[in-house]
Image: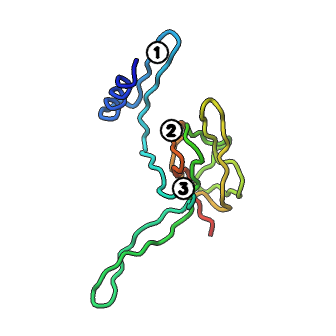
Amino acid sequence: MNINEIETLVELVAASEIREIVLRNQDRKLTIRKPSKQVLPSPKPSAGRKQKAIATAGPAGNTKSVAVEQEPRILSPMVGLFRHAEPPVGVGTTIKQGSIVGVIESMKLMNDVRSEYDGVVTEILVESGMPVEYGSPLFAVDNA
């Protein structure tokens, strides 16, 4: 199978109701899996915080957009398949800076994902087994 055929299969799976397709031959296996949530890389991986634009009314009815910083995000340090830690970190779990919140499998190596923050997990942004990019948000943390 060449790269053009694989790309065509990926496009077909993305455009269809098919969630996963597995192809095997004598010594190779190809799995194309559609994630249930779209994972987008963060524009500033080092920042680790989500920003939200809010329109405010100024004098004489003029509006302006203001960036408001929201809760910090634990971001993927690399490309690979994300797996939740054992035991899994869930919403409401208290974490400490440096604690392991998951692992990323990359090139058959398991790499720990550690929290950069002390706080409470408020949102899980990626499911176990999903592919992630460098800087993809994995967890939202309330560290107030």
Q: Amino acid at mark 2?
A: Pro
Q: Secondary structure at mark 1?
A: strand
* Mark 3 → mark 2, Cα distance in angstroms: 17 Å
* Mark 1 → mark 3, Cα distance in angstroms: 36 Å
Outermost top residue? 26
Q: Amino acid at mark 3?
A: Pro
Q: Secondary structure at mark 2?
A: strand
Disc nearest the viewer among 1 and 3? 3
Q: Nearer the viewer, residue 21 or 107?
A: 107
Q: Which residue is mark 3?
A: 45
Q: Which residue is mark 2?
A: 131
Residue 24 badge: 1
Q: Earlier in the sequence, mark 2 or mark 1?
A: 1
Picture quadrant where residue 106 is located: top right
Q: Residues within 10 Å of mark 2 (few under 14, many from 20)?
A: many
**Position of 122 compared to 64: left or right?**
right
